[in-house]
Image: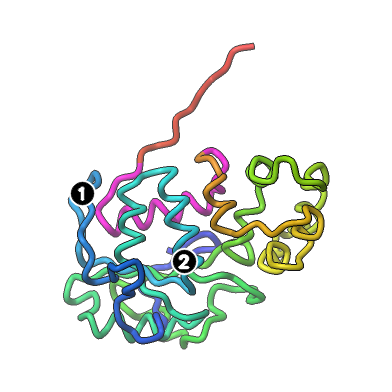
Amino acid sequence: MASDGKQRGGSGGRANASAKPSRSRGRGASGGRRSSGRGNGNDRFVLYVEGPRDREILETWARRVEPAVARCIEERTVIMGGRQPVRALEDFRKRGGGDSGWRGLIVLDRDHHPEPEATAASPEDLAGEPGLELFVWGLRHIESYLLVPSAIRRLAAGFEGVERLDSLIAAELGVDGQGHAKRFLGTGGSLSEALGTDLRAGEIARAMRADELHADVRVLLTRIGALSGVTLPQPEVVIRRS
């Protein structure tokens, strides 16, 4: 399975710096308490992300959909320290890999790479590691999925420049959705200049509602749930009659 907001099975890379379970927040990727969400659970699942902010954003989004998936992200994430999937591959193999029942998922920004294959790992590594999957965001950065005018408007209510949000975000994303969201949201970026204040990525994620999550986000959360033994609820469809 692949992803532009899709994943591909059996792809590898390298993971968090030390190739050891993340210990931030007091619980690491291999030593955390297993959540008791719906499903049979899977203690042999590990999620690899580029940095702590990616984990914070994913965990926050997951809380909007299924708390058990959020706990899984909190407890079973390894930080790669950048776009370095070969570290994930090394860590995954040290754990015993797919032959020992492990399942792993690497999540990467697309960045400036036009194709999911454009990573630091060799094509052989990406295609040949049993149990290890690769998910590449369809948009340029995970932060691109935070550019939701309604959520930012709620968070920035009262600040000047709010009325320009829609046009600012549309201009940043561009026709192909490959705008530089990290720069846009960062200190001194277009958003902070327009509002006169900085908004943290985690704050925007917390301001988002479940119905504001992009389809790519739901695809990833569903896959994390499947690999960790948690079934996500289906979105509720509300039909309003005029």
Q: Is residue 69 left or right of residue 54?
A: left
| Three-letter amino acid code at the position of disc 2 | Phe
Where residue 65 sits in the image (x, y, percent)?
Answer: 41, 43
Say what secondary structure mark 2 lies in: strand
Task: Identify which residue, 201 or 170, lies in the foreground.
Answer: 201
Instruction: Name the residue rendered at 30%, 63% in the picture.
Output: 75
- Point out residue 174 in the picture as x, y percentages from the top left corner: 78, 58
Specify the principal SS of the magenta part: helix
Image position of 242 with respect to 38: above or below: above
Residue at image mark 1: 36
Between 5 and 24, the one lying in front of the other is: 24
Is residue 43 part of the magenta span, yes or no? no
Instruction: Return the residue found at the far top.
Output: 242
The residue sitting at 64% across, 66% down in the picture is: 140
Left-right relation of 91 to 192? left
Q: CA distance from mark 2 to mark 1?
A: 25 Å
Q: Residues within 10 Å of mark 2 (few under 14, many from 20)?
A: many
Judge by depth and name the residue closer to the eye, 66 or 100: 66
Magenta residues (range): 211-232
Quadrant where the image shows the N terminus: bottom left
Q: Amino acid at mark 1?
A: Ser
Quick check: 156 left or right of 190?
A: left
Residue 135's disc is: 2
Image mark for residue 91: none
- Quadrant for the C terminus in the image: top right
